[in-house]
Image: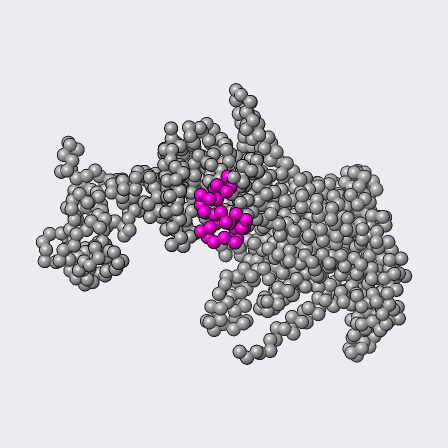
Amino acid sequence: MPMRERHAFSSPRDAGEGFILKETTMALGYAADALTTPEFDADGFRRLGRFLLRPLWLAPVACALIVTTLYPFVFLVALSLSKSSLGKPFRAFAGLKNYALALGDGEFIASLLRTVAYALLSSAIQVAAGLALALLLFTLLKGGRFLLSLFLLPLMTPPVMVGVAWKLILAPAGGLLNGTLLRLGLVDEPVSFLGSAALAWASIALADLWQWTPFVAILCFAALSSLPEGVDDAARLDGAGPFERFWYITLPLIAAPLAAIFLIKLIFAFKLFDLTYILTYGGPGFATTTTGFSIFRLSMQQFEVARAAAETLIFAALIGLVTLPVVRLHRALERREA
Amino acid sequence: MSAISLSGLAKSYRDVPVVKGVDLDIAEGEFVVLVGPSGCGKSTLLKMIAGLEELSAGDIRIAGRSVVDLAPAERELAMVFQSYALYPHMTVAGNIGFALRIAGLPRAEIDRRVRAAAATVKLEGLLDRYPRALSGGQRQRVAIARALARQPKVLLFDEPLSNLDAALRQETRVEIARLHKALKATILYVTHDQVEAMTLADRIVLMNNGRIEQAGTPLDLYERPATLFVARFLGTPAINLFGAARMGLPGAATVGIRPEHLLLEDATHPGGLAARVEFVEELGDVRLIHLLTEADEKIVAKQPAGSPWQAGQSVRVSWRTEHLHRFDLAGQRLDDAPEQRPEKAA
Amino acid sequence: MRRRFDHRLPLAAIALAFFALPILYLASLSFKTKDDVLSGAFLPGTVTLANWAQAFEAAPLSTFTVNSVTVALLSGLLTVLITVPAAYAVLRLRYGWQRLSDVTLSSFMAPPIVAIIPLFYLLKGAGLLNTVAGLVLVYGMVNVPVAYWLITPFLRRVPVELEQAAELDGAGPLRRLVSIVLPLIAPGLAATGLIVTILAYNEFLFASVFTFGNETRTLPVGISLFQGDRLVNFGQMAAASLTGIVPVYLVALFLQRFLVQGLAHGGIK
């Protein structure tokens, strides 16, 4: 009697390459069993039915992935090779002209550099701040859990509203920050925080930090909670001070999760859009125009979707290039642990 | 007809064989204990019979019917898990009755059978409790009742006592033996504990490295171990082993003798091996005398309470020939001494 | 035992103040009069409710709110319905393509801007541009990787023996999911559902491109337009923003237990 894989918990890694062939033969086997039994085989038919229903479990996710990832990439590739406008896509084949245009555009290249620099820097700062916050709350333990849920609020705030709130705080006339600085006599006239390149970036970074640090802190908190018990106490008995315990004990132990957290934050940082839209609209000039924002304006305001498609694909490739070392680092750290 | 019949059963994970061809027949009403060191494949074998692991080769018949193509639930067997696997969000009654509810039995029938199963393991008062409100022993009994409620042809136990403390383990062991007597159920029971195996089994199946090393009654295995491995696995303290050449027993590679079969005499006595008492473990009913021979072999003798041996004393160790177990280079038992079995000498 | 002053407490207080400040300032602004705003002080001099009334007059905030809540709830439900059976089938039943997990998670790396042009044409072709249904579908699918990521650790923690016991008890795959697994992962399910719902509620980029009439706009889009309007004063902007924030905060406050758990368990294991 032939053995067929059927049961739920059997082979954990049966999804190799010959998978489709295997599944097909199995289905045929069930059908043959059901049909060749002399008397009507209800069990056989039920098994066949159950087997044929399997794809239905996965179909919705597969469909979502196709719509949100596969189709967009194929579409963008086609679009980037065409002469198109928003209203009239695919008017003619354009070869690599759109890529040439994009790569020849100094402003686009500048936006890529800005985006990557901001993503790396802001993620590093936020992971450091989040870890500090988590350590603070973790050592305060009992109150920590309660405070932790309070820190959820920034994360839950719609980014547009975060932008509005910070824009109001930073406003030259009537803003809280300028008002306070004036009152304390630290400045003589209101500072235009969103009017100069450096201060505008700092403002975006501040609002971004406000929104995301609590999230990073929650993840760090979880990583700290998973530390083996007693290790810290043992180090304390060995005479290690707080800084030494952090540097030699805690940090090496949470290195792998920390790399994962940095990776997650980096991915989110590349998605930055709402805050720049509200706070600076890419300005002053193009000073805070990220690649995402520039693609948005190019496609939805100047209707140059073909060139935008080329820029999008270049951007996606760059993100892959930047995140890959972080993924590698995380894997290496995890392997070291295992 | 056998209750369970396994033939050529094999299982590999990727290319690593875990079960390497097992043949076994279990009679109806028999209590068979699968025992062996961890990683010997006994739990995998049990899960293959239950239908929770697929087979790489072989056939399983339950009551004469091949079940390899049947889903676990269609095999008319029930299983008690090591972790009990109680559904934490269901009451005791819900746990016991879950299978019956799925089978679509009428409510009254479910209720009757839940109560009956609960009564068998003395759980009557606890039917409305949730598993988290039960002690370890009570959870264990719920797991057994859940298996009984389905009135299976075969009961499978996967190390059911390993999560209990020593006292409770003893008590539950007796309880399971009593249950087997009362229900006359066919039971296949997996454990790594030789005491459970010896006390519970009608027949012990000792597995090693994916194969059956020996199957037989507990006394069979203890008194006539088929291999060196079996001899070493059963018995506490473990059997004493000597190189056969040293003992002047040609033909064998290794000779074993159980601690209770060693005879001790004081050093003045002629014959036997000279040894020195290293230390004595006092167990109350018996004394374990740890000895060091002249050739630096560590051996243990089991002596009655009140025997006179003290640490540091020199003694002579001897034995009766019929108590010797002789094994060849491959660890296979050599049949009893040729002088006792002259017909085999030819 | 002698109690020493704990220097960590003031640090925690400062952190808390920093994270509370923008929201408290919004609240304060929303009660300030027009002249009072220019003072740049933290607390209002005189308290007025006028901003709230004017904000609701100046923009159809209630329509936006209804749109936002509808889109968020329906798309959150859709995401969970799409994700949970598939995650269960892949992780526990070992059905199908095991690499689906990796593919799903890595699809989350691409920023939403990548999908915006293709999805624009897709919605246009389907006649779903500028409709609530279109947004529900987009969010429902876009948030699948997040949901997959959040629910995975919960699914992995369900002991295999429980499902084996249920399988022996005769429960098929769907039955095991519904009767055994879902009740056990209920907190994780709640967390996942909540988080994807909030993500949908907060989303701005897709909504700003795929809707262009007040009857379909969501709160973030409405407020982004509102703040660009020169005629609107700070107080009204604050009031409008708070209108959008309050629903999420209420949810977060009542269901914080699930949120922390869901977020903390996700991620790093």
Taking the image as shown, residue B323 lies to the left or right of residue A162, namely left
Pick the quarter of the image with the N terminus of chain B: top left
Taking the image as shown, residue A187 lies to the left or right of residue B5, namely right
In the image, residue A262 lies at what x, y percent?
62, 58
Taking the image as shown, residue A329 lies to the left or right of residue A206, namely left
In the image, residue A95 lies at what x, y percent?
74, 41
- In the image, residue C91 sits, relative to residue A256, either above or below, namely above
Look at 43% across and 31% down and name the residue there: B62
Look at 17% across and 39% down and name the residue there: B337
User: Viewer-proximal residue, B110 or A223?
Assistant: B110
User: Viewer-proximal residue, A190 or C175?
Assistant: C175
Look at 57% across and 30% down and name the residue there: A46
One can see residue A159 in this view: no
- In the image, residue B70 sits, relative to residue B143, either above or below, namely above
For the magenta stretch, what is the residue range?
B113-139
One can see residue A236 in this view: yes
User: Viewer-proximal residue, A126 or C16?
Assistant: C16
Looking at the rendered structure, the number of numbered marks drawn on it comes to 0
Magenta stretch contains residue C194:
no
Taking the image as shown, residue B231 lies to the left or right of residue B17, namely left
In the image, residue A224 lies at what x, y percent?
56, 62
Magenta stretch contains residue B131:
yes
User: Viewer-proximal residue, A299 or C267?
Assistant: C267
Q: Main secondary structure of the magenta part?
A: helix
